[in-house]
Amino acid sequence: MGIGNKKSEINAIKKGEGRLSMSTPGGDAELLYKIEGNIMSIYHTFVPESERGKGMAEKLADEAFDMAREKHLLVRPDCPYILHYLEKHKDAKTMAVDPEI
């Protein structure tokens, strides 16, 4: 396995029930969500301290919003990072449940 393959393997997003994750040298980065009816509640994101600032939380959020779009879901941002994400991604803001966001 070459170095390029190792890097893409580390940055690959794994999908589990209610969880998106990425393996990193510092541990797993993760985004947790639950779906109730037509609403995806994103309630937790975590990136290991040594991996912060590298865009991993944003990649996980991008994937979560892509999933919500595909399933025609609205998103309830129950996590502080997702509120921050919505400020940067105006297109995703239209999917948010809370109209004050």
Image (tube, grey):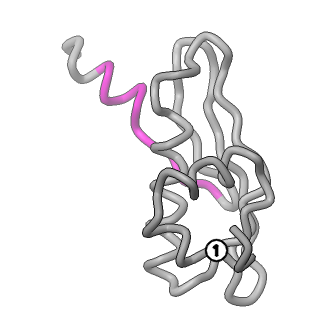
Residue 47 image point, x, y percent: 64, 28
* Coordinates of residue 57 in the picture (x, y in percent): 56, 38
- Residues shaded magenta: 6-16
Q: Residue at x 49, y 69 (%)?
A: 67
State left or right for residue 79 relative to residue 52. right
Question: Residue 76, how many percent across, how many down?
Answer: 73, 70
Label 1: few (<14), some (14–19) or many (≥20) C-alpha neighbours in 10 Å: many
To which quarter of the image does residue 36 belong?
A: bottom right
Residue at x 75% of width, y 68% of height: 41
Which quarter of the image is occupied by the C terminus?
bottom right
What x and y, as percent, mark residue 96?
64, 74
Task: Name the foreground residue: 35 vs 81.
Answer: 81
Between 20 and 5, the one nearer to me in the picture: 20
Task: Say which residue appears at 67% left-offset and 61% top-offset.
Answer: 17
The three-letter code of the residue at mark 1 reads Ala
Label 1: element kind: loop
Tag 1 residue: 96
